């Protein structure tokens, strides 16, 4: 009346180890579409925006300064921004948060 070892063993994993791997792969796919991909798209849009900066555009820096672009030298990462009549500063392009065209109205902060 002893149970033989063949009957005492539990049933094996029907997926052969893939049962644990599948949820992990599903989480990676979800993270890619919800977090990684949108961040890459925003970074691409930001790179395109700062590459199209031209003289006369109104820009907003990451420090919160709003000024008008007076010089955009080729081959450098800096632009010259006029904050007031007597104050011109050099700003690194990557610190620009927003570029407003010459005739573009201010965006509503709703």
Image (cartoon, grey):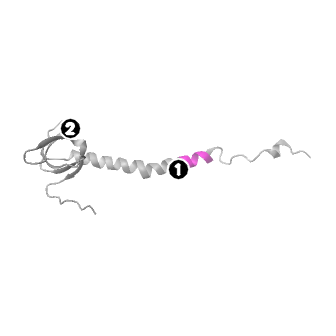
**Which residue is more in the foreground, 54 or 68?**
68
Q: Left or right: 10 with respect to 56? A: right
Which residue is painted at 87% across and 45% down in the image?
3
- Assess disc 1: are there few (<14), some (14-19) or many (≥20) residues with their C-alpha within 10 Å of its C-alpha: few
Residue 41 x %, y %? 34, 49
The extreme right residue here reads 1
**Which residue is more in the foreground, 31 or 48?**
31
Q: Left or right: 52 with respect to 29? A: left
Residue 20 x %, y %? 61, 46
Q: Left or right: 40 with respect to 54? A: right
Mark 2 vs 1: CB contact within 8 A: no
Locate the C terminus by quadrant. bottom left
Q: Is residue 44 magenta?
A: no
Which of discs 2 and 1 lies nearer the camera? The answer is: 2
Residue 79 x %, y %? 16, 41
Which residue is painted at 14% across and 41% down in the image?
89
Question: Residues in magenta?
Answer: 19-24
Name the residue tied to disc 2. Answer: 77
Name the residue tied to disc 1. Answer: 26
> Which secondary structure type mostly characterizes the magenta part of the structure?
helix
Q: Residue 95 is drawn in which quadrant?
A: top left
Vertical relation: 35 (above or below) 90? below
Between the residue at mark 2 and the residue at mark 1, the CA separation in whole angstroms equals 41 Å
- Assess disc 2: are there few (<14), some (14-19) or many (≥20) residues with their C-alpha within 10 Å of its C-alpha: few
| Sequence-first tag of 2 and 1 | 1
- SS class, disc 1: helix
The extreme top residue here reads 75
**Which residue is more in the foreground, 87 or 77?**
87
- SS class, disc 2: loop
């Amino acid at each position: 009346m002893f149970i033989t070892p063949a009957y005492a063993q539990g049933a094996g994993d029907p997926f052969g180890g893939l049962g644990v791997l599948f949820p992990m792969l599903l989480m990676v796919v979800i993270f890619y579409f919800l977090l990684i991909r949108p961040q890459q798209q925003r970074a691409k849009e930001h790179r395109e925006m700062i590459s199209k900066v031209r003289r006369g555009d109104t820009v907003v820096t990451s420090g919160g300064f709003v000024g008008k672009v007076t010089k955009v030298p080729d081959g450098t990462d800096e632009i010259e921004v006029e904050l007031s009549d007597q104050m011109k500063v050099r700003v690194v392009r990557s610190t620009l948060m927003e570029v407003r065209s010459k005739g573009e109205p201010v965006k509503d902060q709703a």
